[in-house]
Image (spheres, grey):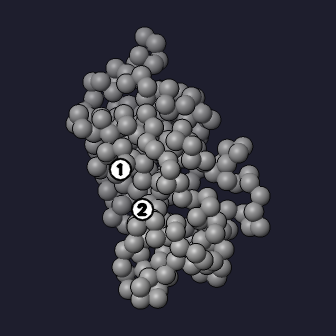
Amino acid sequence: MDKKQKFVDIINSSDNIVFFGGAGVSTESNIPDFRSVDGLYNQKYKYPPETILSHTFFVHRTEDFFEFYRDKMLAPWAKPNVTHKTLARLEQQGKLKAIVTQNIDGLHEMAGSKKVFNLHGTVYRNYCMKCGKFYPMEHVKDSVGIPRCSCGGVVKPDVVLYEEGLDDNVVEGAINAIAKADVLIIGGTSLTVYPAAGFINYFNGKHLILINKQTTQFDNKADLVFHEGLGDMFGLL
C-alpha cells in the first residue's frame, strides 16, 4: 500500500488522534517561521530574535521589545489554511481529541478548534502586569511605544518568552492528551525546542506520524514520515 494511502486510512479508522504542531503549520498562512532560510533568525536586527524575545530584554528594553513584537509577532491578517481547517473538522467529527501547538497565532481557534493547548501562549490574550485586566490583541497592535492599562500598568502579551516557564495546567493537559492518544501526528516542527519536544516521549499509542519538510531526530521512531508540506498531506483528507 502506498504511504499516503496508509496515512489516510489511519486517520479514517481512528477516533483518538492528537496533533502536535509547530511553526510549519502556519507558514502556509504566510506567517514566517523562525529557523528557515528566510525565517526570523536569519533576518538582521540590532539584537538576535532570541534576545529580543527574552524575559530579560522585555524587562530592560520594553519599548524595543514591543517594536519588534508588533512588527514580527503579530499577523492579524493571517487566515487559517487547509491544515487548520481539516484539524477543526476532524475534531467536530469526534476523531481528533486535542491539538498541542507551539504557535501563538490563534489560527487553530480561528478555524474552529476547541481543544487547543497553546504551549507558548497566544497573541490574542494580553494582560496588565499591575492589575491583571485583560486586553485584546488590537490594544497592543494599535498602541504606540509601550501599551498601557487604564491603571497605568504595562500590558504584557500572554506569550511565553525565553527564560519563562510554560503554564503548568497547559503542560499537564498536553501531556495527558498525548499519553492517551492512539495516533499522534507531529507536523511542521523541527522538534528542537524543549521542553515541548520532550512531550513526544509520553506517546504510547499505535501510530506516530511525522510531517515536516526537514528531517528530525524523531524520524526513526515514526511509523510514517513525510518530508513535505502539511497542506499537501491534510489536503488528502
Q: Position of residue 75 (x, y in %)?
A: 53, 54
Residue 230 versus residue 176 in the image, above or below = above
Going from N to C along the chain, the mark reached first, 2 or 1, is: 1
Residue 124: give its label: 2
* Front-lying residue, 166 or 198: 166
Q: In which quarter of the view is residue 203 placed?
A: top left
Residue 187: give its label: none
Q: What amino acid type should be assigned to the residue bearing mark 1?
A: Glu
Q: What amino acid type should be assigned to the residue bearing mark 2?
A: Tyr
* Front-lying residue, 223 or 13: 13
16 sits to left or right of 118: left
For this orientation, the residue located farthest to the bottom is 151
The residue depicted at 57 percent of the width and 78 percent of the height is 146
The residue depicted at 46 percent of the width and 70 percent of the height is 139
Residue under numbered circle 1? 109
15 sits to left or right of 78: left
The residue depicted at 66 percent of the width and 74 percent of the height is 64
Task: Give yes or no for contact between labels 2 and 1 (Cβ–Cβ under 8 Å).
Answer: yes
Residue 94 versus residue 167 in the image, above or below = above
Asked whether residue 130 is in view, the answer is no
The residue depicted at 52 percent of the width and 66 percent of the height is 141
Element carrying mark 1: helix
* Front-lying residue, 205 or 165: 165
58 sits to left or right of 102: right
Mark 2 neighbour density, 10 Å: few (under 14) some (14–19) many (20 or more) = many
Using the numbered discs, state the Cα–Cα distance from disc 2 to disc 1 in whole angstroms. 10 Å
